[in-house]
Amino acid sequence: MLLNRDEIPGYRSEIEAVGELFFGGETRSFITYIIGNTNNSESCRHLFVRSAGGRIVAFLILSTVLDESEILQVAVKKEYQRSGFAAALLEEVFGFCREMGISKIFLEVREGNLPARSLYEKFGFEEAGLRKGYYENPRENGVIMAKNLPDSAPEKSKK
């Protein structure tokens, strides 16, 4: 589910609790940006969530600039991992991007995060580059992955 800016404060603590496990305070910064960004420019961030038992258990933060997007964060609570939540978020994001006319999606993942890399490859992402020593705690390379969305052109109205 894509949350609009006005809905996010009601879920903020749940989203931050999931993100804190993986990203520390970085999730909090992204959410603050999303809520405060009233600029209708070509660059913005979107927050997608999934819930179970009435609680947020997974989220994805997407940044869009013109016809490209970058997945900034994906997190699923440990007890819900490998249950389809990340896959559902990716499917929703692909549909959203196609509707928005996005032609390419990027993401970055720790080189050693093999389960995540495998999931992204399953969804058509391919390695596009490497950022040596990008991550800390522990120090690790970041693998840049990309996916083309060939059917991303907005539908033209038929006459």
Image (cartoon, rainbow, N blue to C red):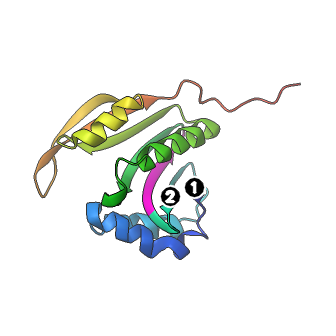
Q: Is residue 58 magenta?
A: yes
Disc 1 packing (10 Å; few <14; some 14–19; many ≥20): some
Residue 116 point in image, percent of width and height: 30, 42
Q: How many marks?
A: 2
**In-front residue for pair 87/102:** 87
Residue at coordinates 53% horizontally, 38% vertically from top-left?
Answer: 94
Confirm whether residue 28 shows in the render: no
Residue at coordinates 43% horizontally, 75% vertically from top-left?
Answer: 13
Residue 38 point in image, percent of width and height: 59, 65
Q: Secondary structure at mark 1?
A: loop
**In-front residue for pair 82/28:** 82
Q: Secondary structure at mark 2?
A: strand
Residue 30 point in image, percent of width and height: 41, 63
Q: Is residue 143 left or right of residue 79?
A: left
- Name the amino acid, label 1: Met
The span picked out in magenta is: 57-66
Residue at coordinates 10% horizontally, 51% vertically from top-left?
Answer: 139
Residue at coordinates 38% horizontally, 70% vertically from top-left?
Answer: 16
Q: Which residue is mark 1?
A: 1
Q: Are marks 2 and 1 in contact (CB under 8 Å)?
A: yes
- Name the amino acid, label 2: Val
Disc 2 packing (10 Å; few <14; some 14–19; many ≥20): many
Per the picture, the main secondary structure of the magenta-coloured stretch is strand
Q: Which residue is mark 2?
A: 49
Q: Is residue 65 magenta?
A: yes
Q: CA distance from mark 2 to mark 1?
A: 5 Å
Confirm whether residue 5 shows in the render: yes
